[in-house]
Amino acid sequence: MSETPAVQDWAIYMDTQLAERGWEVRDLAAAADLSPSVVFRWKHGFPPNLKNARAAAGALGVPLLEIMVVSGLMTPAEAGATVSVPPGLSDIPDDELVDEMRRRLKSRNDNA
């Protein structure tokens, strides 16, 4: 049985969101006040319900609409808006990532 694009997109999205924060399943579960098994299912493509989508959006600091569209709970047309999902870290060229890290470290040192 092959996965549908929505399932693949949601699983990839969840992996990316966790990786960008250096989080494990338990970290998102704690931040969203959810059971780790719920988040584990998301990483395998199972979509959230509306209540859990709200909790995830709040914990991740992303728009609820983004969660709804990426998880396949609603289409962009149903959302009535264009949803733009930021690129994952693996989509950003290495030199841009290094430049951003340098900028952040310099800013942190300047503010210390």
Image: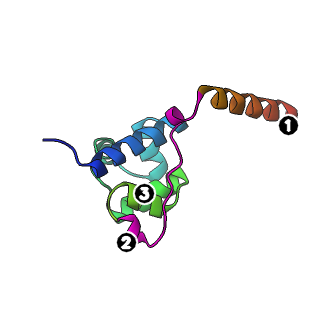
Dots 3, 1 in contact, CB < 8 A: no
Q: Quadrant for residue 2, please give it.
A: top left
Residue 37 at x, y percent in the picture: 30, 44
Of discs 3 and 1, which sits in the foreground? 3
Q: Name the residue under label 1.
A: 111
Q: Which colour scheme is used?
A: rainbow
- Main SS, magenta region, reads loop
The front one of 27 and 61 is 61
Q: In this view, does 45 lie to the left or right of 78?
A: left
Is 83 magenta? The answer is yes
Task: Compute the Cα span from label 3 to label 1.
Answer: 34 Å
Q: What stretch is highlighted in magenta?
A: 75-93
Is 70 magenta? The answer is no
Q: Name the residue under label 3.
A: 67
The front one of 12 and 30 is 12
**Which mark identifies residue 15?**
none
